[in-house]
C-alpha cells in the first residue's frame, strides 16, 4: 500500500478561504522521497501553482476541491509562453516518471477570474492579453502519467497538455468548461507518443482532443475511445508544425454533440498527417456556431508556411451525423490529401444551412480558405483536389424525409430559431433558413478528384430536379445517386 500524506497534516485548511499552496507542496515533496500518495480530503483547498514529483500519486477524495487562485501572481511562469500556452500552470508535472492524479474530487481553475465579458451576448468570452494560467495542468517531458476519475472545470485556458511525453493514460475524467470560454481546450497532445484516452466526458469552448507535434518531436499512437464530447470547436483534431508528423490516430466508439466539427484534420505546414481511423461515431452539430462541418479535412500552404502539407490514409466509417452542414474535404495546389475513405456514413438534416453568408466572408483560418468555390458549394459532401477518394454508401435524409415528432417539428425548429456565433469572430450571424427557404443541396460536389470511386445507392439531392452529383474535372467513377 502507498504511503499516505494527508495535506491537512501539513497545515492546509479546507475552508475555501485560507491559502493552502505551501502545505500542499510540502505534502507532495514529502511523498516524492521514496514514493507515496498525497491525499486531498473533502473540503475546498485554495492553491496557486503546485508541482508533482516522480513516483507520486495525488488522490482527491469525494467532496475534495482544489480551487485555483484568482490572482495571476500565484502562478509563476515556469516555461516560455507560446500562443495559448502562457507558461503559468496550476499543476506542473515536468521531467518525471510514474505520476498519477486520481480520485472523485474536483480541480477548479477559476477561469472566470481571468476572462473579460463578451463584446455581445451569445459570443466568446475574452482574455486580457493572455494573462492567465494555461494549460491548467501541464505535463511535459514525462513518462508513465495517469489521470483518472477527477473532474476538471473552469480552466482559464487549455485544461491539460501532454508535451513530449511517453505513455499517457487518461481514463474516466470529466472536463467542464464554458462553451464560450476563450481557447478552453480539453486535452492537448503535443509531440507525445502512446496516449490512451477513454471513457471521458468533455465539454469545452475549444478543441476537445487535439493531437499535434511539437517543434522537435512527432506525435504518434493516440487512441480516443468511449467518450462523450460537446464543444464549440472540434471534437477530435490534428494539425502540424513545420517538417513534423502526426500519425497512427484512432477515434472510435464515441458520441459528439452540439459541436462545430466532429473530426478536423489540418495540414497547413510542410509535414504529414497519416494513418487516421475514425469509426462508430455519432454526432450532431446542433450548437450555437456557424459553418458546421461534421468532418473537415484540409491541406494547403498557410500564410507564413514554407510549403503545403500532406494528409493521407484516412478511414472514416460507421458514422451517423445529425447536421445542418457539410463534410468538406479540400487540397490546395501542391498540397496532398490522398487515400480518404468514407464508408457507411449517414447524414440526417433537420434543416439545411446556407454556407454562403459565413463561408463567402472567409472568417477563420480553418475554413478551406484556398478554395472559395468549395467553401460555399451546396452539397452534403464537398471534395476538391483529392487523390484516391472512396465514398461507399453515403446515406442522406433531407428535411422532407424526417419522422414527425423526431427530427422535425419542435426539434428542428431549435436549429433555425437562434442566431449563431462565428468561429474566429465576435459577430453573430442569422440562423439557418426554414426548410421551405433552404438552398438546394446536391449529394456530392466534386472537383479535381483523381482516383477512387463513389457508390451512392441511397444518396439523392435535397430537391427534385437537382442533380445528385456535381463533378468538374474529375477522374472518378460514380455509381448510383
Image: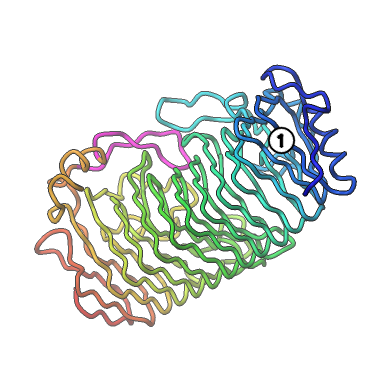
* Residue lying furthest right: 33
- Tell me where residue 152 sits by quadrant: top right
Number of other residues with Cα within 10 Å of mark 1, as a class: few under 14, some 14 to 19, many 20 or more:
many
Q: Where does the magenta region start and end? A: 416-433
Q: Is residue 21 magenta?
A: no
Q: Position of residue 373 (x, y in %)?
A: 34, 60
Q: How many marks?
A: 1
Magenta stretch: dominant SS?
Answer: loop
Q: Which residue is mark 1?
A: 90
Q: Is 247 left, or right, of 78 in this rendering?
A: left
Q: Residue furthest front?
A: 1
> Which colour style is shown?
rainbow
- Horizontal relation, residue 295 to residue 127: left or right: left
Is 364 located above or below residue 419 in the figure? Answer: below
> Residue shown at 77%/54% (left/top)?
98
Q: Position of residue 105 (x, y in %)?
A: 61, 36
The answer to whether residue 129 is left or right of residue 253 is right
Q: Residue at x 33, y 82 (%)?
A: 475
Give residue 55's position: percent from left, percent from top. Answer: 81, 51
**Furthest-left residue in this view:** 464
Location of residue 474 (image quadrant): bottom left
In magenta stretch: residue 427: yes
Image quadrant holding the C terminus, namely bottom left
Residue 391 figure quarter: bottom left
Q: List x then y, in percent, for residue 446.
A: 31, 70
Q: Residue at x 37, y 74 (%)?
A: 448
Q: Is residue 203 left or right of residue 456?
A: right
Q: Which residue occupies 52% across, 56% down?
A: 237
SS type, badge 1: loop
Q: Is residue 458 above or below residue 167?
A: below
Amino acid at each position: 500500500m502507498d504511503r499516505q500524506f494527508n495535506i491537512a497534516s501539513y497545515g492546509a485548511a479546507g475552508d475555501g478561504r485560507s491559502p493552502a499552496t505551501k502545505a500542499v507542496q510540502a505534502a507532495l515533496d514529502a511523498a516524492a522521497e521514496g514514493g507515496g500518495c498525497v491525499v486531498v480530503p473533502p473540503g475546498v483547498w485554495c492553491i496557486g501553482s503546485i508541482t508533482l514529483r516522480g513516483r507520486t500519486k495525488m488522490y482527491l477524495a469525494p467532496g475534495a476541491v482544489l480551487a485555483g487562485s484568482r490572482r495571476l501572481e500565484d502562478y509563476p511562469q515556469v516555461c516560455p509562453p507560446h500562443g495559448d500556452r502562457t507558461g503559468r500552470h496550476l499543476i506542473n508535472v515536468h521531467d518525471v516518471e510514474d505520476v498519477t492524479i486520481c480520485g472523485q474530487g474536483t480541480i477548479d481553475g477559476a477561469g472566470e477570474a481571468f476572462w473579460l465579458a463578451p463584446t455581445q451576448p451569445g459570443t466568446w468570452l475574452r482574455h486580457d492579453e493572455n494573462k492567465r494560467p494555461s494549460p491548467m495542468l501541464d505535463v511535459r517531458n514525462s513518462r508513465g502519467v495517469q489521470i483518472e476519475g477527477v473532474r476538471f472545470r473552469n480552466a482559464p485556458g487549455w485544461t491539460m497538455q501532454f508535451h513530449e511525453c511517453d505513455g499517457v493514460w487518461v481514463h474516466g475524467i470529466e472536463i467542464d468548461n464554458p462553451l464560450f470560454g476563450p481557447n478552453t481546450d480539453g486535452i492537448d497532445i503535443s509531440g507525445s507518443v502512446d496516449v490512451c484516452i477513454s471513457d471521458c466526458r468533455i465539454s469545452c469552448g475549444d478543441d476537445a482532443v487535439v493531437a499535434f507535434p511539437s517543434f522537435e518531436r512527432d506525435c504518434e499512437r493516440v487512441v480516443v475511445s468511449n467518450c462523450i464530447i460537446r464543444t464549440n470547436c472540434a471534437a477530435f483534431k490534428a494539425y502540424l508544425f513545420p517538417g513534423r508528423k502526426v500519425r497512427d490516430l484512432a477515434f472510435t466508439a464515441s458520441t459528439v454533440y452540439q459541436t462545430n466539427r466532429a473530426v478536423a484534420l489540418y495540414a497547413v505546414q510542410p509535414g504529414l498527417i497519416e494513418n487516421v481511423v475514425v469509426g462508430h461515431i455519432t454526432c450532431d452539430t446542433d450548437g450555437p456556431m456557424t459553418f458546421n462541418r461534421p468532418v473537415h479535412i484540409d491541406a494547403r500552404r498557410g500564410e507564413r508556411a514554407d510549403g503545403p502539407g500532406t494528409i493521407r490514409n484516412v478511414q472514416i466509417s460507421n458514422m451517423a451525423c445529425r447536421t445542418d452542414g457539410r463534410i468538406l474535404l479540400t487540397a490546395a495546389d501542391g498540397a496532398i490529401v490522398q487515400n480518404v475513405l468514407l464508408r457507411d456514413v449517414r447524414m440526417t438534416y433537420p434543416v439545411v444551412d446556407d454556407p454562403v453568408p459565413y463561408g463567402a466572408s472567409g472568417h477563420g483560418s480553418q475554413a478551406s480558405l484556398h478554395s472559395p468555390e468549395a467553401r460555399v458549394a451546396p452539397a452534403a459532401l464537398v471534395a476538391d483536389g483529392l487523390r484516391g477518394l472512396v465514398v461507399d454508401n453515403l446515406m442522406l435524409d433531407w428535411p422532407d424525409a424526417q419522422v414527425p415528432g423526431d427530427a422535425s417539428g419542435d426539434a428542428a425548429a431549435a436549429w433555425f430559431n437562434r442566431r449563431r456565433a462565428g468561429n474566429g469572430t465576435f459577430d453573430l450571424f442569422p440562423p439557418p433558413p426554414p426548410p421551405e427557404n433552404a438552398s438546394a443541396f446536391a449529394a456530392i460536389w466534386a472537383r479535381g478528384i483523381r482516383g477512387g470511386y463513389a457508390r451512392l445507392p441511397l444518396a439523392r439531392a435535397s430537391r427534385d430536379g437537382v442533380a445528385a452529383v456535381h463533378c468538374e474535372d474529375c477522374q472518378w467513377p460514380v455509381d448510383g445517386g
